[in-house]
Image (cartoon, grey):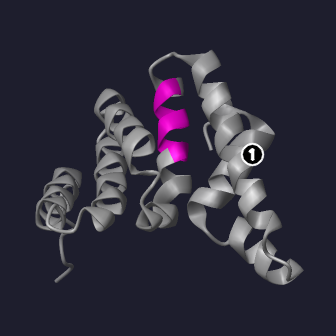
Amino acid sequence: MARRLPHRQHFETEARAGCALLTMVPLYLWPGLVVVAAAQRAQGRAGDALATARHVIDHGTAAAAFASKAALARLIHAECLHALGEHAAAAAALDEAHRRLLAQAALIDDPELRRSFLEGVPEHARTLALARDGLGSGR
């Protein structure tokens, strides 16, 4: 018998429960909130996802643990702005996400590792594709 996948709402509930535990260790709260934003976006709740991503970008960037989810937070931010019809702000946010991603990749000396970093991490590959094709590409 095939196992039924949980509803998308379940993912947000679980991510929020994890974040509640992480309030004791705020350093790790920020990546958890990025997962909440991703769950909200997956549910089609662009306004909520935008607010969560903005909160993380505005307040979590000082935490070293945020770096592991920074690209995803910036991608969600840009995509949600676009979904809400804020196209100029979305383009600026995507440009910022793209610029930061390329700066991070430039620190990787090995060309194969750099390529893997850019193409093998889903949010990095999506950021590159959107920067190349535009936010309206639907990809």
Q: Residue at x 16, y 56 (%)?
A: 16
Q: Which portion, as a residue range, is magenta?
A: 74-81
Q: Which residue is mark 1?
A: 99
Structural crowding at the residue carrying mark 1, measured as other residues with C-alpha within 10 Å and reported as few (<14), some (14–19) or many (≥20): some
Residue 10 placement (x, y as % from top left): 15, 57
Tell me where residue 60 appears, x and y as whole percent. Answer: 39, 50
Q: Say if 94 sits above or below 38 in the image.
A: above
Question: Judging from the image, what secondary structure is the residue with disc 1 in?
Answer: helix
**Secondary structure, magenta segment, majority class:** helix
Q: Position of residue 46 (x, y in %)?
A: 36, 31
Residue 24 is one of the magenta-drawn residues = no
Q: Position of residue 44 (x, y in %)?
A: 33, 36
Residue 132 falls left or right of residue 139:
right
* Picture quarter with the C terminus: top right
Which amino acid, mark 1?
Answer: Arg
Q: Is residue 78 magenta?
A: yes
Residue 129 appears in the figure:
no
Q: Residue at x 70, y 72 (%)?
A: 117
Residue drawn at point x = 76 percent, y = 65 percent? 105
User: Is 119 drawn above or below residue 61 in the view shown?
Assistant: below
